[in-house]
Amino acid sequence: MKYLVGFSRIFVGILFIISGLIKLNDPVGFSFKLEEYFSPGVLDLPILMPYALAISIIVVILEVVLGVMLLVGFKVRFTVWSLLLMIVFFTFLTFYSAYFNKVTDCGCFGDAIKLTPWESFTKDVILLVLILILFFGIKHINAIFGERVGALVSLVAVVACGFFANHVLNHLPAIDFRPYKIGVNIEEAMSVPDDAPKAIYDYAWKFKVNGEEKVIVTQGGYPTVDGEFIDVETTEIQKGYEPPIHDFTIERDGEDMATSLLKEDKLVMVIAYDLAKSNLNVFSDIKKVTDLANSKGYKVIGMSASNDRLTKMIVDQYQLDFDFYFTDETALKTIVRSNPAVLVLKNGTIEQKVHYKDINELKFN
């Protein structure tokens, strides 16, 4: 039991720290995931939607600090109980998501490691078993340091996490795990290689043959059956290749302009996934920056999921010298964790990407 507890302590502590730090690197992204869980189609807790960001920060800091406390052996009973309650809740959440197919990615490791719902549930079940070992073998968890040093280490962890969270919230994630990171060519990331694996489907064809229902399964072709066709059910048995970027469009009047715009030698994108939630005071600075870009020969466009009435109001109010195009809100949230934000591209390759608080750092050649 002593060795089982020792292994579980190290494994659980390190995993909680790693998982927490990955999400702490991008708390806005984790808050989007929480909004999915709080939505009417999942847990139906709309009252929590406005607090998603605050909850995400508290949860991920707690995750990191509990991992640290477990490793150093500080406040062991409180730590183990907290870990047990957290993992019971997470296990319920991932099971609910997997069984009812509600949220396809739990966000357990942010965008760094993507897990399917059932993989997330399996991971949580393993963690639950390991934490139960800690719970029943709690007497074998000894403090590495004295009470004061343990408290100091835990306090340092809390303060460091707080500073880090504040930094990424006021700038951008320190490490960008998303497909739109600097250096990525968007068109190339949307392409599918010729030798990419194709999706494979099973087709269950139902016929009435001699008064009885008969099911014939094929992988595409219509079966030759002397009977009356009733129905067909399709099941994906093997996923095909999905490019890193697969939901990117830049629409104007119902036409996708992405292909032509991504060929621009000098392109500036002003991105605001929802202008109603944007920091509108920033558009005075965006006006100055985009005017400078225009004078340097850059084509400037706005990208938002907001309606035409709102985009026109912003353009008129701040006398912006560019037009807004429509792009899906989820895609815009994935591109950059700032509302608004500015990207600079060259022939479709992202060269600069900044939070609205850093727009003065942009450089135009």
Image (cartoon, grey):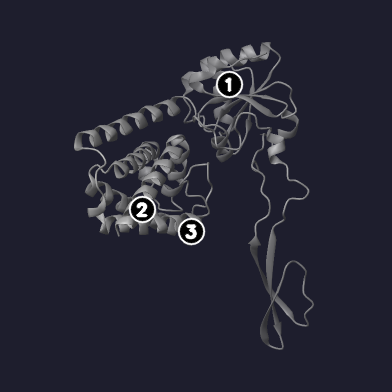
Q: Picture coordinates of residue 110 (x, y %)?
A: 49, 42
Q: Describe the element under mark 3 as helix, strand or loop.
A: helix
Q: Describe the element under mark 2 as helix, strand or loop.
A: helix
Q: Residues within 10 Å of mark 1 (few under 14, many from 20)?
A: some
Which callout, 3 or 2, points at the residue further toward the start of the chain?
Answer: 2
> Label 1 belongs to which residue?
315
Q: Amino acid at mark 2?
A: Ser
Horizontal side of residue 223 vs 303, given as left or right: right
Point out the frontmost of discs 1 and 2.
2
Q: Picture coordinates of residue 362 (x, y %)?
A: 58, 17
Q: Quadrant of residue 335?
A: top right
Which callout, 1 or 2, points at the residue further toward the start of the chain?
Answer: 2
Horizontal side of residue 79 vs 235, given as left or right: left
Point out the frontmost of discs 1 and 3.
3
Which callout, 1 or 3, points at the residue further toward the start of the chain?
Answer: 3
**Along the line of sight, the residue nearer the viewer: 290 or 95:** 95
In the image, farthest residue toward the front: 3
Residue depicted at x 69% and y 40%: 190
- Distance (Cα) linking label 1 and label 3: 43 Å
> Label 3 belongs to which residue?
98
> Label 2 belongs to which residue?
8
**Along the line of sight, the residue nearer the viewer: 320 or 332:** 332
Q: Are marks 1 and 2 in contact (CB under 8 Å)?
A: no
Residue depicted at x 75% and y 66%: 220
Q: Quadrant of residue 320?
A: top right
